[in-house]
Amino acid sequence: MNLKFKSFKYSKDVVLDALRVYIGVALVGKGIYFIQNLNELFELTNTAVSYGDFILSHYIIFAHIVGGLCITFGLLTRMAILANMPILFGAIAFVHLQEGFFTPAQGLEVSMLVFFLLCVGLYHGSGRWSVDYYINKNSDYGPDEDNVLSFSDYLSTKKMYSDKKSEEEEHEKKSA
């Protein structure tokens, strides 16, 4: 039997984009759950931080809802993932690690899975079916680049070209 994986790249893109959309929707849902159960969120954040639980709770809600929407649509995906990663790390370290593995709620396992999927999304970026892809399709970056982490590359490239141009101008002055 001869199996050919001609569309493996396409399949990989579909799977990774589906995971991105799924994790974004899940984060939005969790943010809405925290809005509806704000006192529960205050209790969870109070165990991690004795002061500032009000600010931390509102950051969690904002990062989950706005970041989740950005992740879902693929808009500034890596920035939204970076905003949510400390929250998941804090949930693992300060809330669910005390419960341990194999509890009926499986909070630690689910939080670790979401954190892992955020790491995969951070590595992969927005993907082919995202707003970032269509924004960058006709730009200098190209469609496979993410505009958040590649901005430093853009600046260094721009500086390199301006330095090269100034060297050429100096060379023309010397030869004239």
Image: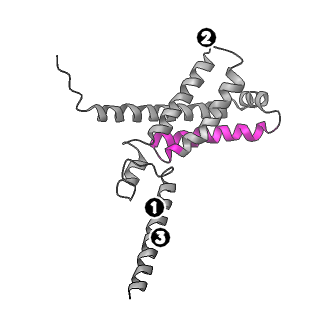
Could you tell me if the residues under marks 2 and 1 are in contact, i.e. CB atoms within 8 Å? no
User: Disc 2 and disc 3: Cα gap in Å?
Assistant: 59 Å
Q: Which mark is residue 157?
A: 1
User: Which residue ends up furthest to the right in the rendered image?
Assistant: 51
**Residue 79: where, in percent of width, then height?**
55, 45
- List the residue tagged with mark 2: 102
Quarter of the C terminus within the rendering? bottom left
Please report the residue visible at 45 percent of the width from the left and 43 percent of the height from the top: 74
The segment highlighted magenta reads: 51-78
For disc 2, the neighbor class at 10 Å (few under 14, some 14 to 19, many from 20) is few
Q: Amino acid at mark 1?
A: Thr
For disc 1, the neighbor class at 10 Å (few under 14, some 14 to 19, many from 20) is few
Asked if 24 appears above or below 113 in the picture, the reply is below
**Residue 6: where, in percent of width, then height?**
22, 32
Nearer to us in this view, 3 or 77: 3
For disc 3, the neighbor class at 10 Å (few under 14, some 14 to 19, many from 20) is few
Please report the residue visible at 71 percent of the width from the left and 30 percent of the height from the top: 41
Q: Amino acid at mark 3?
A: Asp
User: Which residue ends up furthest to the left in the rendered image?
Assistant: 1
The answer to which of marks 2 and 3 sits earlier in the sequence is 2
User: Disc 2 and disc 1: Cα gap in Å?
Assistant: 50 Å
